[in-house]
């Protein structure tokens, strides 16, 4: 996107992305929905208004991070993917049609950035478990053991199946949305979820029969 007088520079966009990723959701809409004023924000950002793009970043940053984390697992890689994705989205903003769902468009860019990182890094750190995955285990008597068992189980899943189960069961994405994010048919997303749940049940045993 050509930079006009008053439009945010790439450096300014980077400064927005340095803000901590919020730990809470910034909205209740689905990935395929838009908050009521989002179209106006997109139009303003396309005109080069810095605050409009900053608001889009703040609105979608947490969910974008969740998408990246489901794919790369490692916290630092997820943050890198989010920053790369927002920079790419900023540069491609002039090609975005405002009547589309900005979230769906952005999250696909995030998924591509995360997948690129996993391809670049053949050896990934699988020691960290996404905090959101561990959230059901709040009983101190069970937490540590179950967290470790789930961490080990997720690490044994193929990359795509792990991404599907985290995106669906933890982050609440629909099968069609997961298919779009990962570039797979909706039916494949469904079968991957079934496979991942079956594998986790087999590994975790009776402690998590509700998976």
Image (cartoon, grey):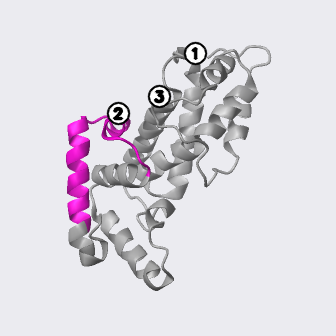
In the image, is residue 211 above or below residue 182? below
Magenta span includes 196: yes
| Residue at image point 41% right, 48% down | 172
Q: Position of residue 205 (x, y in %)?
A: 24, 76
What span is in magenta? 171-200
Q: Is residue 8 visible?
A: no
User: 138 or 179: nearer the eye?
Assistant: 138
Q: What residue is disc 2 on?
A: 180
Q: Position of residue 179 (x, y in %)?
A: 31, 37
Q: What residue is disc 1 on?
A: 94
User: Disc 3 and disc 2: Cα gap in Å?
Assistant: 10 Å
Q: Is residue 111 left or right of residue 205?
A: right
Characterize the local packing of mark 2: few (<14), some (14-19) or many (20 or more) Cα atoms within 10 angstroms: some
Mark 1: secondary structure? helix
**Quadrant location of residue 133?**
bottom left
User: Disc 3 and disc 1: Cα gap in Å?
Assistant: 13 Å
Give the mark, 3 or 1, whose residue is nearer the N terminus: 1
């Amino acid at each position: 996107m050509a930079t006009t007088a008053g439009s945010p520079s790439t450096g300014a966009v980077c400064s927005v992305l340095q803000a901590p990723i919020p730990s809470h959701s910034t909205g209740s809409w689905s990935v395929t929905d838009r908050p009521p004023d989002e179209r106006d924000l997109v139009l303003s950002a396309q005109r080069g208004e810095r605050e409009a793009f900053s608001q889009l970043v703040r609105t979608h940053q947490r969910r974008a991070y969740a998408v990246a984390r489901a794919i790369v697992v490692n916290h630092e890689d997820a943050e890198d993917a989010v920053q790369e994705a927002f920079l790419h989205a900023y540069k491609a903003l002039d090609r975005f049609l405002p009547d589309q769902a900005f979230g769906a468009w952005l999250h696909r860019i995030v998924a591509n950035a995360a997948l690129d990182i996993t391809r670049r890094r053949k050896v990934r750190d699988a020691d960290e478990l996404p905090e959101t995955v561990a959230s059901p285990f709040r009983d101190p008597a069970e937490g540590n053991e179950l967290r470790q068992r789930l961490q080990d189980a997720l690490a044994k899943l193929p990359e795509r199946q792990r991404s599907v189960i985290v995106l669906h069961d933890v982050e609440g994405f629909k099968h069609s949305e997961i298919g779009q994010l990962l570039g797979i048919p909706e039916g494949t997303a469904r079968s991957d979820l079934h496979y991942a749940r079956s594998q986790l049940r087999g590994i975790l045993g009776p402690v998590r029969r509700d998976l």
